[in-house]
Amino acid sequence: MNTIARIKMLKAMEFIARNINDETILNRWLALGIADGDIEYGDLSVGLDNADRLKYYMEDEAFADMMHNFLWCMARAWKSGGLYCDGLVSKDAGEAYQHHLPHGEAGRGQRELHHPPNDG
């Protein structure tokens, strides 16, 4: 197990998930994600001193579940309220489709938009 990599991933997922712009989806993360207080909001510092506090989340099964829950939340956030940060809201799925280039036709320096799976 790469402890530092898992701490980085946990903190990144927590930071991004807390910016979901849909209360219902955010509540799922709050229920199934990282418990309040285990990571101070906005703390992206990484060190082995975090390992004890985050020990439960770094076990293989719990870590895999955490990544699954994060992806579930992101797929749904993309379809509804997007993310909110610093007074800006991301484009939702409807807005993104309007600006989507056909597959394989992204211009130089542009990334193709890959849609998250639709599993309900």
Image (cartoon, helix red, strand yellow):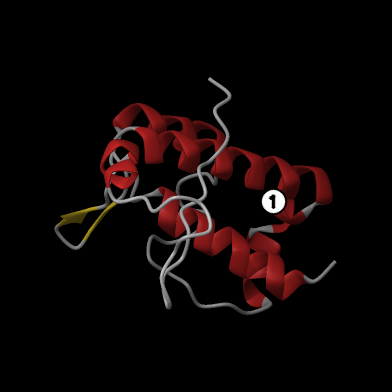
Of 11 and 83, nearer the camera is: 83
Q: Quadrant of residue 107?
A: bottom left
Residue extending furthest toward the top: 120
Of 82 and 4, nearer the camera is: 82
Residue 62 higher or lower than 25, as above or below:
below
Which residue corresponds to the image point at 70% horizontal and 71% vertical from the top-left? 5
Residue ID for mark 1 = 57
Which residue corresponds to the image point at 27% horizontal and 48% vertical from the top-left? 91
Mark 1 crowdedness (10 Å alpha carbons): few <14, some 14-19, many ≥20: some
Residue 53 higher or lower than 94, as above or below:
below
Q: Quadrant of residue 80?
A: top left
Position in image of residue 57 (x %, y %): 69, 51
Of 113 and 53, nearer the camera is: 113
Residue 92 higher or lower than 23, as above or below:
below
Residue 35 higher or lower than 107, as above or below:
above
Position in image of residue 8 (x %, y %): 60, 69
Which residue corresponds to the image point at 36% horizontal and 50% vertical from the top-left? 100
Position in image of residue 3 (x %, y %): 76, 70
Instruction: Residue type at mark 1: give it.
Output: Tyr
Q: In which quadrant will I find the N terminus? A: bottom right
SS class, disc 1: helix
Would you say 55 lies left or right of 105 here?
right
Position in image of residue 46 (x %, y %): 58, 77
